[in-house]
Image: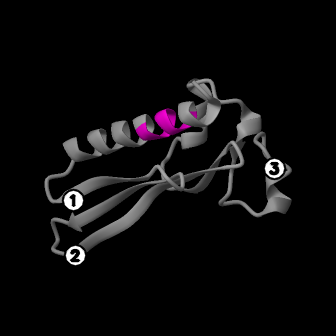
Amino acid sequence: MDKVELYRQHIQKLLRDRAERSMRNSMNVEAQTVFDREDDHYQLVYVGWKRNGSRDYGCLLHLDIKDNKIWIQYDGTEGGIAYKLLELGVPRTDIVLGYQPPEIRIHSEFAVV
C-alpha cells in the first residue's frame, strides 16, 4: 500500500473514532465526518442543538493530504490529532501544522512544509 493511501486510512479511522465517541455523549448534536477522497480533504463537524436551545455547528478537525504530507488545517481537540498520527506511525516529517504560520512552524517538532 502506498503512503498516501495509508494516510487516508489513518485519517478516516481517527475521525470516525472521534465521531463515535462524541455521539455517545450527546443526543441533540451530531458528529459528522466529511471525506473528500478525490481531493484529500477530511473534516469532523458538529451540527445540532444544545440543551439550552442554541445552535451548535462547527468544525472540530480539518486535515488535508498535500504533497504526500498530512496538513492539519484545524485541530479543536485537547490532546492534538498530530500525536494520534504519530502513534499510528506517521513520521513527524510528514505532519504539517497548517494552522500555524510558517515562521512559527519552524520551531515545532513537526514538518515546516
Q: Amino acid at mark 3?
A: Val
Q: Nearer the viewer, mark 2 or mark 1?
A: 1
**Mark 3 or mark 1, which is nearer the start of the sequence?**
1
* Residue that sits furthest to the bottom in the current view: 54
Q: Which mark is residue 108?
A: none
**Would you say 107 lies left or right of 25 here?**
right
User: How far is mark 1 from mark 3, CA to CA?
Assistant: 35 Å
**Mark 3 or mark 2, which is nearer the start of the sequence?**
2
| Residue 110, x across and y down, in percent | 75, 41
**Residue that appears at 84% across and 49% down:** 107
Tally the marks: 3
Q: Amino acid at mark 1?
A: Val
Q: Main secondary structure of the magenta part?
A: helix
Q: Say whether residue 108 is magenta.
A: no
Point out the stretch of residues depicted in magenta.
7-12
**Would you say 36 lies left or right of 85 here?**
left
Q: Are marks 2 and 3 in contact (CB under 8 Å)?
A: no
Q: Residues within 10 Å of mark 3 (few under 14, many from 20)?
A: some
**Residue that appears at 32% across and 69% down:** 57
Q: Secondary structure at mark 3?
A: loop
Which residue is label 2 attached to? Answer: 54
**Residue that appears at 79% across and 51% down:** 113
Which residue is label 1 attached to? Answer: 29
Q: Secondary structure at mark 1?
A: strand
Which residue is label 3 attached to? Answer: 112
Query: Which of the 4 image quarters holds residue 50?
Result: bottom left
**Would you say 107 lies left or right of 36 here?**
right
Q: Secondary structure at mark 2?
A: loop
Q: Amino acid at mark 2?
A: Ser
